[in-house]
Amino acid sequence: AALELRPQVARVARNFLNDAFLGLGPLLFSPRILAAGAVVFAARYKIRKMAMPMSELCRLLGDPDAQHQVERASEEILKVFKLSSAAAATAKSAAAVDPGASGAR
């Protein structure tokens, strides 16, 4: 089952990493930490409440003490995701109320 989820988690992580560039993530974290945070967030997104083996992930990063930074990077990605989702929902509801307000003329 884990091998089947790998490409899905990778795709979702890539999307979340792209979204992270809309926030402060690239300024706060190194690229490796931000990418690891995206993988953690993607895994949690795909499999609700999944316990991610953080020590193993940090070992793969070459920094066993990076767990706190990876968690913070994952939280930063979550903030951007929530803001992006809220903005999309607001735009969708505004378009539903006033279809001409979408800018199409």
Image (cartoon, rainbow, N blue to C red):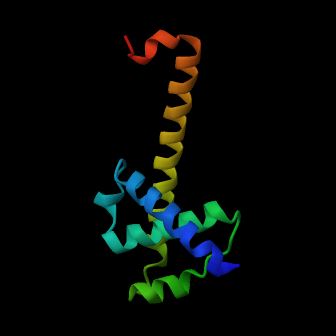
Residue 97 visible to the viewer: yes
Outermost residue on the left side: it is 27
Is residue 64 visible from the viewing direction of this image? no
Q: In the picture, which quadrant includes the N terminus?
A: bottom right
Q: Give the answer, above or below, for where 59 lies relative to 96.
A: below
Residue 101 % position (x, y): 45, 12
Residue at 58%, 12% in the rendered image: 97
Q: Quadrant of residue 35?
A: bottom left
Quadrant housing the C terminus? top left
Q: Nearer the viewer, residue 81 or 98?
A: 98
Residue at 50%, 64% in the rendered image = 11
Residue 7 x/y as whole percent: 54, 71
Q: Which of the two residues, 15 or 71, is positioned nearer the viewer here?
A: 15
Residue 96 placement, left or right of 26: right
Rendered image quadrant of residue 8: bottom right
Q: Residue at x 38, y 89 (%)?
A: 62
Q: Position of residue 99 (x, y in %)?
A: 52, 13
Q: Position of residue 34 (x, y in %)?
A: 39, 67
Q: Is residue 97 above or below residue 49?
A: above
The tally of labels here is: 0
